[in-house]
Image (cartoon, rainbow, N blue to C red):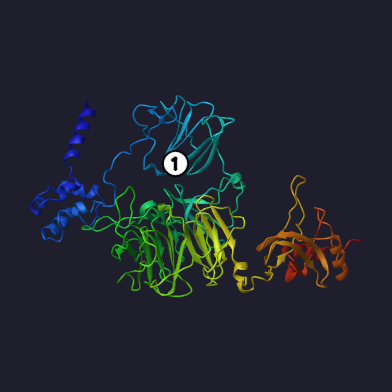
Amino acid sequence: DIREESKEEGQEQDDKALKPEQFKSMSKSDFLALENESLADYLRSNRFPRQYDVAKVKAMVKSDELKPSDLHLYTYDKNAADTEGEVIGAEIYLTEDGGKTWKRTHDGYIDDFFFSYGYVFAEMDVNPQDRDEIYLVGVPLIKSTDGGKTFTYIDEPNVHVDHHVIWVDPDMPNHLINGNDGGLNMSYDAGKSWNKLNSIALGQFYAINVDYEKPYNVYGGLQDNGTWKGPHTYSYSKDYEAEGQYPYKSIGGGDGMQVQIDRRNSNIVYAGSQFGYYNRMNLETGERKYIKPSHGLGEAPYRFNWETPILLSPHNQDILYMGGNKLMRSMNQGDDWTPISPDLTAGGKKGNVPFGTLTNVTESPFQFGLLYTGSDDGVIQVTQDAGGSWAIISEELPQDLWVSKVLASSHKKGRVYATLNGYRYDDFKPYVYVSDDFGASWKDISSNLPLSPVNVIIEDPVKENILYLGTDDASYISFDQGSSWELLDGSMPNVAVHDMVVQTEANDLVIGTHGRSIYITNLDEIQKFDAGKASDLQLFELDAVDYSTNWGRSWSAWRAANAPEIKIAFYAPQSGKATLEILSAAEKTVKSWEVAVEKGFNYIPYDLTISEAGKKQLEKETKDLKIAKAQSDVYYIPPGSYQVQVKVAGKTASTKLKVDEGSRRRDWAEAAANAPEED
């Protein structure tokens, strides 16, 4: 049998192939006697850097620049598990006597269910009306109808892999809901077919970033859904389905991680997936280059975190940093790398994923080479000379925790922030610190934060006393540099906040959540708020409004009329009732209404309508003004200057409202003026 002979020949070649363990104790003479072809195969199959060909490696060993054991060291990761190979499992056991005795329901293991470690899978549900119908969620979704003896796949093409939960309707058992890394799916036929529940934003973002195009784009790395890019102006709508063009586009696969965008050319993007597998991409040309750093011969492999940190230097966009267990720097956009540090972690531990890795790198905008790093084992280090020397600055902080964020201040050169996260040790205390002396001493600014692990902290780019913070449950704001914190909720649900960034030109805070996608809020009112006058009513300025003759119109009897809306923003010193009034130039009321408000920032919608009495008042004040009812049977405020007045708890504040002649209004007026007179 030719196939059997070929198989035996291949096995024989594998047996003859050099193995890493052979080099551990190999003598210099034995190494130099190795066949060149075998050594070349070894170097190639173990991905040694190209410059280390057979001739160079033998020459280096001959001159004692290298030892044969270095060829083992290059491939040996002391951080990896002791054993490698197939993932064993899973199994199901049944008890029918309350747990006194158990029996396995099937022969052998349930194969092809886990292809990696099962710490995020392994849920099970049973049809409450049929004990023999069992659902298991793992990498695939599988089902048994014979009490766990045999299983079949019930995945469909529109169901994402990596399953986490299954729910069986107790009243209608064929009705299933499945939660996976791609969102939610629902079935009404026990898994034969599935619908995708896309009406809820369920993006699991690890990291987000923005560019400075107009309109600007948001970039994000998602759990098992790659890296995506899209305009910040997009809000959920199914309109795109008519054209088949979803506004957000995939730019990378795997588990999407951090993203860096070249400020000089936003088509140059750095993105990738878990454990440091990053690429430099040109989104205009489609060019893509793999840029993960390789360790040198004679070094042990680098360790890279699941979410490997990358950073383009704010001082030079050709300079890219990447953190493994050492900090790597490229001066040419990731083409070549140089380690600029020793191991900056506590050294790592054996396990099934790399540990003792960098989780953060930040560079001060005040000084090139003033860098801070944080690790997953609690070590924070600083260099003030671009990696020439390093100092540990975390000795007085709680030890051995995950450094979730280190941030060099953009307001003060010596200021740096750090957040630590202990949930992996069942420690849910919020750890938040600031230093004003490059980390020589730290101040705890966790203050009144509730019990919840902290993932991220950033500064306001305008006001140095304002900080934003994300935990596993919500986002928070401080107006006094962390002396006190307030919930920054608005329309955002209680959800894990993993990353934050401010787009400074639009003045938008962009928040990436691990579960409910992306939220954006403008910071104008927050920055204008006077925290020293928190007992006062504060009404914020309004942008001018362009009048439109389309207000209140509908192109179809079956469509709602076009309804304009602006937001009247104010800070209320206490909860209760607020009265809002629109006043004419003569300070007469043209519209008045009441709303319930909460203590804090309130954004009250105003539909730009006026009352009938207000219409008569404006016509009285302005000669020849005639305000017609819109198609929607309401009166809209005409172009002019007005005041908005707000009254809360005996306090009053007012601001201007300018309604300009919009382009439609001007075109209509000019057309009317130029129209020929009728006989």
Query: How far across and down, in percent of the image, does residue 290 sit?
Result: 35, 54
Looking at the rendering, in which quadrant would you find the C terminus? bottom right
Query: How far across and down, in percent of the image, does residue 307 sit?
Result: 40, 55
Image point 33% across, 57% down: which residue? 356
Residue 438 figure quarter: bottom left
Left of 573 or right of it: where is 382? left
* Mark 1 surroundings: few (<14), some (14-19) or many (≥20) residues within 10 A: some
Which residue is at the front of the view, 382 or 194? 382
Q: How many labels, in total?
A: 1
Left of 567 or right of it: where is 222? left
**Is residue 49 depicted above or below 525 in this figure?**
above
Query: How far across and down, in percent of the image, does residue 401 sit?
Result: 39, 58
**Is residue 230 depicted above or below 332 in this figure?**
above
Q: Is residue 623 visible?
A: no
Which residue is at the front of the view, 249 or 140? 140
Label 1's element? loop
Image point 21% across, 53% down: which residue? 73
Q: Residue furthest right?
A: 679
Q: Is residue 520 visible?
A: yes
Query: How far across and down, in percent of the image, does residue 130 sit?
Result: 51, 26
Q: Which residue is mark 1?
A: 162
Which residue is at the front of the view, 561 or 567? 567
Residue 437 figure quarter: bottom left
Identified by mark 1, the residue type is Asp
Left of 154 or right of it: where is 536? right
Looking at the rendering, in which quadrant would you find the N terminus? top left
